Amino acid sequence: TRLAGVIGWPVTHSRSPLLHNHWCARHGVNGAYVPLPVRPGALATALAGLAAAGFEGVNVTIPHKEDAFGLVTRRTHVAQRAGAVNTIRFEPDGSMTGDCTDGTGFIADLRARGIETVRRALVLGAGGAARAIAAALLDAGGEVLIANRTATRAEVLTRALCGGEAVRWDAWPARLEGCDLLVNATSLGLNGAEGPDEAGYWAECLERAPSALAVADIVYNPLRTPLLAAAETRGLTTVDGLGMLIQQARAGFASWFGVWPEADAETRALLLATP
Ligand code: ATR
């Protein structure tokens, strides 16, 4: 049996075991994928133990993605750009290869939904998810603007990745002109509206959005976030976070289990049906 898993703290909420074990069954792989609760600070010990126990590799999630970046033997170009590692392969020689599949997963999902090119995107947020997505959009040839509630974090990220000026948080709606994609990579909207005004906030922000704008939210719980609801009301194309969740998992599965898994309607339905 080939073994893989997801390291996080907490990790019980992770959908990855459901997804990978579904793919194992679907593709006839003799494999198992388990949740691995590992405390902050214990990642190095856990990785060494899992490699010694014969695991093929692991996914790494909050709060370990930046630590994983520092612990692997080598990183892919994408992981280097993202400053984080979410997928590790234990090599036969004892070394570890680290990849970051969040940004490429996001782009793959856009393509799967018929959004082939993004000329200019506005990314909201400056955490790990925002960085991975902004880097992937830039690497795909687009221009990226970054806005964040805490301006210094937007400035640091803009300097590191894109050059130019960060967008002021209260000014981002005015900068949608000329953009073909808006991405919410903040935690606003997670677990429903933060306050009674959140729906109104997004509706107001999108009031003068160009009609060709696509609106993406990386949050998938709930699937229809207040931002996506406001975008739908305006008749804009929307992209929810579930597709990215599925797409970012595919590269790890392929590397550990040797099969490129399907990201089809059945997979999506399974995740939707399981609370
Ligand atoms: P991750 O690494 O998962 O992206 P993070 O680093 O905690 O997570 O980032 C969360 C993002 O959501 C940040 O950009 C944060 O803004 P700050 O840098 O100002 O903290 C943003 N965020 C969280 N709550 C927010 C809110 N109520 N309004 C606007 N932005 C918010």
Image (tube, rainbow, N blue to C red):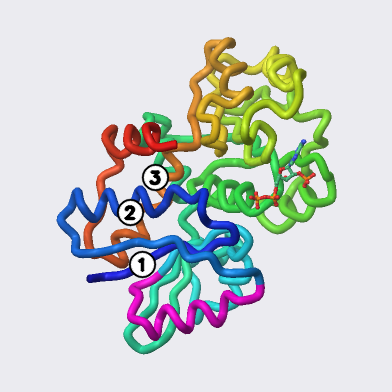
Whether label 2 touches label 1, CB < 8 Å: yes
Residue 74's x, y, as percent?
A: 49, 78
Q: Is residue 265 above or below residue 159?
A: above
Q: Is residue 222 left or right of residue 226?
A: left
Q: Range of the magenta residues?
A: 41-57
**Residue at image location 39% in from the left, 33% down from the top:** 272
- Distance from disc 1 to disc 3, alpha carbons, whole Å, reads 16 Å
Q: Which mark is residue 246?
A: 3
Residue 184's x, y, as percent?
A: 63, 35
Q: Residues within 10 Å of mark 2 (few under 14, many from 20)?
A: many
Q: Residues within 10 Å of mark 1 (few under 14, many from 20)?
A: many
Front tag of 2 and 3: 2
Q: Circle 1 is placed at which residue position?
A: 4
Q: Is residue 206 above or below residue 51?
A: above
Quarter of the rendered image showing ligand 1: top right
Q: Is residue 235 left or right of residue 163?
A: left
Q: Is residue 258 left or right of residue 141?
A: left
Instruction: Report the number of numbered marks.
Output: 3
**Residue at image location 48% in from the left, 29% down from the top:** 239
Task: Specify the amino acid type for callout 1.
Answer: Ala
Front tag of 1 and 3: 1
- Distance from disc 2 to disc 1, alpha carbons, whole Å, reads 9 Å
Disc on the earlier residue, 1 or 3: 1
The answer, for residue 79, to whether it is visible in the render is: no
Q: Circle 2 is placed at which residue position?
A: 20
Q: Is residue 13 magenta?
A: no
Q: Which mark is residue 52?
A: none
**Residue at image location 40% in from the left, 64% down from the top:** 5
